[in-house]
Amino acid sequence: MRQFVLLCVVLVGSVSAQEPPYANLPAAAPPYYRVRYEGSTQTGELVYPVSFTIWIPPHVKTLRGLIIHQHGCGEGSCTSGQTGAFDLHWQALASKHECALMSPVYEQPEKADCQLWCDPRNGSDKIFQKSLEDLGAETRHPELVTIPWAIWGHSGGGHWAGGMTLLHPERVAAAWLRSGVPPIAAVAGKPAPYEISQAACQVPIMCNLGTKEGVTDKESRFAGVWSGNEAFFLALRAKKGLIGVSIDPLSSHDCGNQRYLAMPWFDACLTARLPAALGESLKPMSNDDGWFAPLNAVDANVVAPVSAAKFAGDIEKSVWLPNEAAAVAWTQYVRDSSVKDTTPPPAPTNLQVVGNVLTWTAEADLESGLAGFIVERDGQLLVNVPEQPKNPFGRPIFQNLSYSDTPTQPLVEMKYIDTKAEAGKTYQYRVIAVNTVGLKSK
């Protein structure tokens, strides 16, 4: 695999880009690809090294879009981005819509200035678009240069995702801003505010945060998150922007269970907006197509959304949602962070047994992800893999999850060694997938 390198700059107090923690990226062999660039000393260019890892669904001949999973600020959050493209749940969303899945890793030293990358005007926009050219050549998908983007961002990544939406509204199919938004008002000593264009108001946006980020907890470290989100939301809704707010009633700055709302929301937006043919413009959505609910940030009695024709509240302070399915999921999420699912996950495939080692492959359930597997031997339960699914921030999940909504390292394998198998005996094995609401596959 080729590696693309820009100018190198020595950052005072930083670790070398070739040393931990930024040397621990999982290997990128097809269908994964990666490019990496050193930081630049040139004005207006990115000062930090950055890598971009992309996953291409093997069955897709021509990509229709690119989903970007953008980490937040600080060394811990930046390193969490190393596994973003390997997330089976996000891959399920990308695969359904024939999109690639990308996870950038900005190699920001601890306590260095996050604005130097999370504000895309400081060079990260330029180098991101450079990566699309280089990855387009590397993957033989030159359409990466022109296809639409669906952007998810956490914290500083939310600032980046929102900034890219305001800068390039014609390219963004939808944007999910978890615990971070770009500045839209002038504040001394802060980055210059962005302008809100009418084009940007036509992009579906979700502001998502935890209630402990200033909604119910006014004293926490992240108490200022809500005021920024509220101002951003009201500014866009005043211009009839297609924007909503979803508040996790359980979490703080971690990502909690937000992916179970993000998936149906992105699914609805991508279904409605992605063009049928390469080169065509994104399809429009409007207020008339949406479902609405009043913005009751601290009211425990959630008012269920209704269609635009039935909504009689203050439209400029209303939460916009793309369709009825997303509205139902939103109502469940803001009440207790649970989103229901009645469909089982896909069955595992390619089960192989070599000696006493079992391996298989599986796709995640689009709605509820993948909690684990049941392995049977001769029709009887042998083991659950993993025996205890983990996730300190939400539903237990097969790949575990970091604070920043990415799988933990080392990446878990779909593998089991049957140490109790007896030599010379023949066994029949079966593997069943289980999603995060407990439903089982065939």
Image (spheres, rainbow, N blue to C red):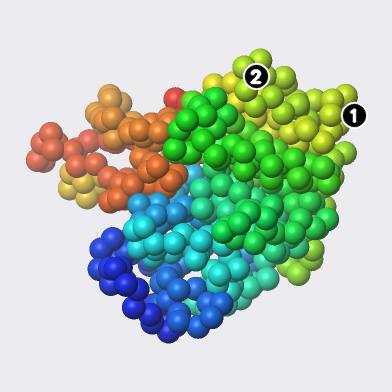
* Image-quadrant location for residue 391: top left
Judging by the rendered image, the residue that carries numbered circle 2 is: 299
Judging by the rendered image, the residue that carries numbered circle 1 is: 309
Q: Which mark is residue 239?
A: none
Looking at the image, the residue that sits furthest to the right is 309
**Residue 131 pos. (x, y %):** 53, 73
Which of these two is toward me, 190 or 251?
Answer: 190
User: Disc 2 vs disc 1: which is toward the camera?
Assistant: 2
Which of these two is toward me, 143 or 210?
Answer: 210
**Residue 209 pos. (x, y %):** 56, 37
**Residue 63 pos. (x, y %):** 63, 64
- Residue 242 visible in the snapshot: no
Crowd around label 2: few <14 · some 14–19 · many ≥20 (10 Å): few
**Residue 413 pos. (x, y %):** 30, 48
Question: Which SS class for mark 1?
Answer: helix
Left or right of residue 260: residue 385? left
Q: Which quarter of the rendered picture does the N terminus lie within? A: bottom left
Which residue occupies 84% across, 29% down? 314
- Asked whether the residues under the numbered discs 2 and 1 touch, taking CB atoms below 8 Å apart as contact, a structural biologist would say no
Q: Is residue 227 above or below residue 88?
A: above
Which residue occupies 44% across, 38% down? 221
